[in-house]
Image (cartoon, rainbow, N blue to C red):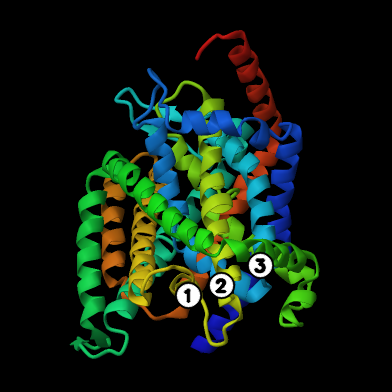
Amino acid sequence: MWKTINDLLVQIDDLVWGVPLMVLIMAGGILLTLRLGFLQIRKLPLALKWMVKNEEGGEGEISSFSALCTALSATIGTGNIVGVATAVGAGGPGALFWMIVAAFFGMATKFSEGLLAVKYRVVDEDGHSLGGPFYYIEQGMGKKWKWLAKLFAFFGVCVGLFGIGTFSQVNGIASAVHGFFDPNNKHCVQIFSLGRYSWSVVIASLILAFCVAAVLIGGIKRIASVSQVVVPFMAIIYFLFAAILIITNITQVPAAVKIIVKAAFTPKAVTGGAVGSMFMAMQKGVARGIFSNEAGLGSAPIAAAAAQTKEPVRQGLVSMTGTFIDTIVICTLTGLSIVLTGAWQVDGLEGVAVTTYAFQKGLPFPAEISAFILMLCLVFFAFTTILGWDYYSERCLEYLSGGNMKHVKIYRWVYILAVFIGPYMTVSAVWTIADIFNGLMAIPNMIALFALNGVIVKETKDFFERHERGDFN
């Protein structure tokens, strides 16, 4: 029976994350890129400048930079380490090329999401703000579309609680800690009827649950304050070590880039037939790219809506830098490290083991130190993803419940409980269900972006006309 259910879920997952959804998201990004005149190229320097320069006097709960860090806390996660390795393993080195292409068009999508989130958000008298796809669907498209807004919010709650925010991230942390400290299960303990587990897993789950609870109980402001410290720290650490790896192997970089570009269009010429077609490389790259940077899924605009800003376009530009940092910078570094060290060709390696091999072989440090660095990055990446997705799912529940904060507080404790039991969850269906809901979130959001693309273009044009006149700094 369970096998039948699992098979059915896998089929649904393949259908949801199939060609139609990827075409929908990519088509949206291409349309917005053309209509905005390749804004992600023209305005990237300005966006990076405003990323670290907060606006003064705007409504909202947290600074613009804090809102970006909260969004990045959810997007910079295991996908940057494990997801890239999975994409390259399944689709060949060419998958990295298509991942970057998806991110390029995704920047226009993320800009549009951030813009609409601020334009249609609701800010209470006490400064509490709520916004995201559910509000720009309801208020931008009209009340008759409220059912679509509620559908998005429902999917958002499910994604946060049933996998991407809890079980999958916690399992990632527990596996990383276990693999480093006790890979041979020499120190185990019986956990009730669940089975025997390494003490490293038990201790990691207790520490993680405590840390998550300590942050989440403080609400958005504490999540933001932690994110704006941890996210830049972990991103810079990972960037530095990945850059060291590439610099110490700089002579092999041109050949690696050639392999990536060639494999994007003629995979068999590089993989020897291990990867079937250009379509496979494209599919894996685009799918993992979307999963990693979340452009089009509608999650990041929920955080953008909390930013202290008066200008929707300004926050849209800041939101756009999230996709640039997540995929075009961090995922590219991971993928390049995997290709130039040949880690993708090693038999028997998959997931995080591929990236670990690349770091151990490519970095000029002892293997234990390289493995420890990667484990630390993975733990921090997954930890902040847990925080970010709690915030997203809480805001979705707040919208569904009509602002009833009692429901939100109860949900918060259920979420913390899910984090605590996460390492002991072994049902593969949990991850498949999470993946399905994650994909389903994108459908209402992309419908709204297509419907409101005229609003996006008008707001952008008006903003830059005022900016050129010098109406504001």
Which of the numbered marks, if any, corresponds to residue 284? 3
Q: Quadrant of residue 469?
A: top right
**Circle on res. 459:** none
> 53 and 286: which one is in front?
53
Q: How many other residues sit within 10 Å of disc 2, few (<14), some (14-19) or many (≥20)?
A: many
Q: Is 461 left or right of 312, judged from the image as shown?
A: right
Are the residues flagged by discs 2 and 3 in contact, CB closer than 8 Å?
no
* Label 1 close to label 2 by CB (< 8 Å): yes
Horizontal side of residue 412 vs 437, given as left or right: left
Percent coordinates x, y for residue 378 in the rendering: 38, 64
Q: Is residue 457 above or below residue 397?
A: above
**Residue at horizontal 63 percent and vertical 23 percent from the top:** 459
Which residue type does callout 3 highlight? Lys
The answer to whether residue 461 is seen in the rendering is: yes
Task: For label 1, count other residues whose C-alpha is less than 10 Å away and answer few (under 14), some (14-19) or many (20+).
Answer: some
Which callout, 3 or 1, points to the residue nearer the camera?
1
Q: Position of residue 280 (x, y in %)?
A: 73, 71
Mark 1: secondary structure: helix
Picture coordinates of residue 294, whole percent (x, y): 55, 52
Sequence-first disc among 3 and 1? 3
**Badge number at residue 361:** 1
